[in-house]
Amino acid sequence: MDAVFSWQPLEFVGRMPPLWESGPKSVAGDTDRELVRRVKAGDRTAFDVLFARYQHKICTLIARHLSDPAEAEDVAQEAFVKAFRALPRFRGESSFYTWLYRIAINAARNHALAQSRRPPSADIDAEDAQHLDGAQRLATAETPEAVAMRDELAAEIDGAIAALPDDLRIALTLREFEGLSYERIAAIMECPVGTVRSRIFRARAAIDQRIAPLLGGARSAGDG
């Protein structure tokens, strides 16, 4: 099958009409399972709904692994095309959402391998940093010293995440930035829940170790 849906760059999505506007009005409110059934039955409009439903999440996920936004959009498009072509073989043993995430992660990995480079994470701002255990200690006061250190801390966290092995970085990203449960991450990464917890623990420990000198400096400045 050839994909027939239209790619929408994220900055234009909010201003464009829904892709399913001209199709059956009942489609937009259907569950993923029902939409998958419709696609398999030949209703390509149903895949437009799935695409519109998950394009933000998939593009955001991939952008955390690729530094170039244009590349991230291309890889996200590729992931949806692969999903569309593979959908007839989707058996529904996991949710469509989990299955699609797995395809997107594999597409990002394959792209990074083809480019012979490790994909860095997306930029991390001060609010993102608060999701990381070690960084939370810096958010206790809005002192001039703390504000001045934020750019340096964000850059250090960014570098620490980029330096993580793929499995640790993906597990951490899905948990901290996507907010997925350990069970959902385990399904996406096709490993036991205990392995997911271990990977996230190791990732957090590595990041905490890297930013510890900065946090120690922040505490010293605050004591002064």
Image (cartoon, rainbow, N blue to C red):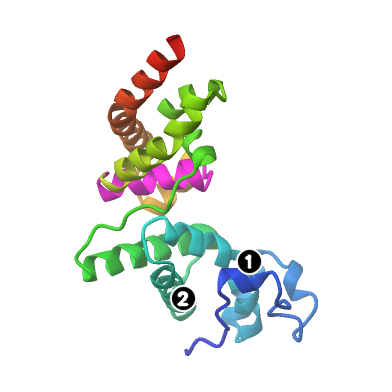
Q: What secondary structure is marked by label 1?
A: helix
Q: Estimate how packed mark 2 is, as few (under 14), some (14 to 19) or many (20 or more) residues with alpha carbons within 10 Å.
A: many
The percent coordinates of residue 6 (x first, y second) are 58, 83
Is residue 125 in view from this perspective?
Answer: yes
Question: Where 61 falls versus 46 (above or below)?
Answer: above
Q: Which residues are magenta?
A: 164-181
Mark identifier at residue 77: 2
Residue 20, image x, y percentages: 71, 80
Please report the residue visible at 22 percent of the width from the left and 62 percent of the height from the top: 117
Q: Is 99 placed above or below 126 here?
A: below
Count of numbered labels shown in the rendering: 2
The crowding category of the residue bearing disc 1, from other C-alpha atoms within 10 Å (few below 14, some 14 to 19, many at least 20), is: some
The location of residue 88, given as percent across then percent down, is: 48, 78
Judge depth for marks 2 and 1 and give the one in front: 2
Judge whether residue 180 is colored magenta.
yes
As shown in the figure, which amino acid type bears the numbered disc 1?
Answer: Arg
**What amino acid is at disc 2?**
Gln
Q: Is residue 168 above or below residue 62?
A: above
Asked if one can make out residue 50 in the rendered structure from this viewpoint, the answer is no
Residue corresponding to mark 1: 53
Identify which residue is drawn at 60% across, 87% down: 42
Closer to the camera in the image, 53 or 148: 148
- Which residue is found at the position 57% from the left and 63% from the top? 56
